[in-house]
Amino acid sequence: MLSKIICGLSLMLVPSNFAQANSSRHETQSPAVEYQKLLDEYEGGAKAPELGGRFLTLAEQHSSDPVAVDALVWVLTKLRTRPEATRAIELLERNHLHDEKLSAACRHVARTPALAAEKLLRTAMEKSRDEKVRGQACRQLAYLLDQQASVVDQLKKEPESVDRVMQFYGAEYGKHLKALDREKLEKKREQLFELMLKSFADVSTSDGTLGEIAQKALFRIRHLSIGRVAPEIEGEDIFGKTFKLSDHRGKVVVLSFWGHW
């Protein structure tokens, strides 16, 4: 009789222990697994706005895990014109300023139409302990200013587009864009490329070193921009006579480039 009672108690304990084991496995689920589950939900048809808050929560609760930056970048790429993107930038600045992964994330930050984007890039450029992060922040800040200059040009050429710009970028950022000065933006870009050449020239990227990128950008700004003096060119005219472009300064000149490859 006693053995039957003991056997019965053991059977009663099995479901409870099994439930505790399952609960323990659920509680210790890794951030990487949680991140992948969210990605699977998105691929399965869930809408990005429905998942944005959960990606942010994952990044905030596991800020020391490498997957946190991935979660924030997902928000920036899928929800870049929404408030969730601004929150993602704030978390990147607060928790990942010195994380090497921020160097790649800077590209997505620069494409986010929010005042927080420029703030993060400037802060990372000045304060991050990681040289690659500082260099990429400098490069992407120059890109951001270039995009702002394009909007300024659009507003100047098409004043009637103001409402569309305000609607797309939102009232706060749209107002910021309207107040920008084209010449000042161009000067700031030139200064950023000078800084890249001086301080981050050896930082490697998929497009070459930042020094190489900066040299090309500075040449375009200083010699190929409207209003700047064109670089010297030497060649032969159709009669075989040698000439220099500077020989025709002040005249309208049409150059035709051709060749055989």
Image (cartoon, rainbow, N blue to C red):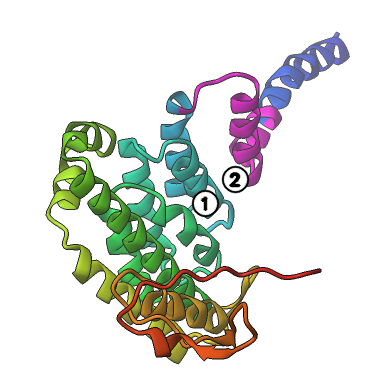
Q: Which mark is residue 68?
A: 1
Q: Residue furthest front?
A: 239
Please name the amino acid that badge 2 sits on.
Pro
Residue 154 location (% of width, % of height) = 26, 46
Q: Which residue is mark 2?
A: 31
In the picture, which quadrant includes the C terminus?
bottom right
Residue 72 location (% of width, % of height) = 47, 47
Point out the stretch of residues depicted in magenta. Answer: 21-48
Q: Relative to the observer, which residue lies in front, 49 or 194?
A: 194
Query: In the image, what residue occupies the spot 40% across and 63% down?
Result: 143
Residue 179 colored in magenta in the image:
no
Please name the amino acid that badge 1 sits on.
Ala
Query: In the image, what residue occupies the spot 38% across and 68% down?
Result: 142
Instruction: Reply above or below: 144 against 84.
Output: below
Q: Residues within 10 Å of mark 2 (few under 14, many from 20)?
A: some
Mark 1 in CB contact with mark 2 (< 8 angstroms): yes
Query: In the image, what residue occupies the spot 41% across and 90% down?
Result: 247
